Image (cartoon, rainbow, N blue to C red):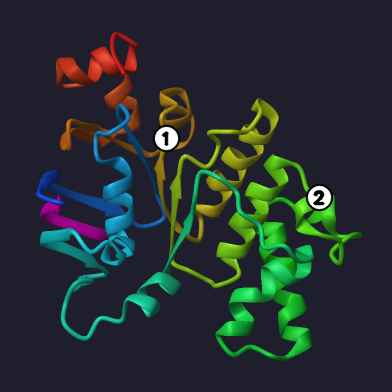
Amino acid sequence: MEDTVKFKIENLNVYWSGSHVLKSISMDIGANKILGIIGPSGSGKTVFLRTLNRLNDMELQIRIEGGVLLDGKDIFAPGMDPVMLRKKIGMVFALPIPLPASIYNNIIYGPSLSGITNKNRLDEIVVKSLKSAFLWDEVKDRLKTSAMRLSGGQQQRLCLARTLAMEPEVILLDEPCSGLDPISTTQIEYALKELKKNYTIVLVTNNTKQAARVADNTAFFLMNELIEYGPTGTIFTVPGDIRTMDYITGRFG
């Protein structure tokens, strides 16, 4: 049985301040899969990620050509609301930035802004989100304490829980483990493997071993181009392009 396609990217080109930062990218991203995106710094990985939920729209010097279809609908079509799109496509950034508030208030911030005011419903969202981010057992007795007192790894999982509280369909992650210790990284990776049962996940990582561990499919970007895309096992064992092999074996990057 063929995988369901969540995103279809068709000849995507992105220009930023006159520079061609993504060149003719085409790929399908399967639903309930983890796509790992690897490549050296400056290869266009983050620009691609931010294109998927239109965060690049906030940049004045950006120009985008081509198509990005989410469940068959063009995310750049007239009438497509970027705010509603971002509710469907949540994002976790490299640096965890908890709000200067309690753990509980960090989680309910988004749902409250969306109009949810029922205390029991908000409580349910907090418990579900923290459990999904594998943080509940560590913080359930101190929900009213400041999120700023959490460790770096806990803060990153809190940011993941905060994203999950908005009940997205897709989770984008931009180097979520870049500043974390191995134990915290393992916790994040375990959470992602469990979350793909209910979400589509796109993970940008400079850690090729992380992509090999968690991604179902891997895309290799180099110099603003998609060099190779396919099942992770194939990419890491019998890549079709010598540049892919050189990168994953550490010859450059």
Q: Which residue is mark 2?
A: 149
Residue type at mark 1?
A: Thr
Depth check, front residue: 93 or 141? 93
Q: Position of residue 13 (x, y in %)?
A: 11, 52
The crowd level at tag 2 (other Cα within 10 Å; few <14, some 14-19, many 20+) is few
Depth check, front residue: 83 or 192? 83
Q: Position of residue 66 (x, y in %)?
A: 9, 60
Dot 2 and dot 1 residues touching (CB under 8 Å): no
Q: Which residue is mark 1?
A: 205
Work out whether residue 247 can be spotted.
yes
Query: In the rendered view, would you say 57 is above or below 235?
Result: below
170 left or right, relative to 3: right
**Quadrant where the C terminus is found in the figure:** top left
Q: Which residues are magenta?
A: 1-16
Among all residues in the image, which is located at the extreme right?
Answer: 141
- Find residue 250 and report its image quarter: top left
Depth check, front residue: 129 or 152? 152
Q: Residue at x 13, y 60 (%)?
A: 63
Instruction: State the predominant SS element of the stretch in magenta.
Output: strand
Q: Residue at x 86, y 60 (%)?
A: 140
Among all residues in the image, which is located at the extreme top?
Answer: 251
Query: In the rendered view, would you say 250 is above or below 165?
Result: above
Q: Is residue 2 magenta?
A: yes
In whole angstroms, how far apart are the C-alphas of marks 2 and 1? Answer: 26 Å
27 left or right, relative to 152: left
Q: Which mark is residue 119?
A: none
The crowd level at tag 1 (other Cα within 10 Å; few <14, some 14-19, many 20+) is many
Q: Position of residue 197 (x, y in %)?
A: 51, 55
Going from the N terminus, do you reach mark 2 or mark 1 first? 2
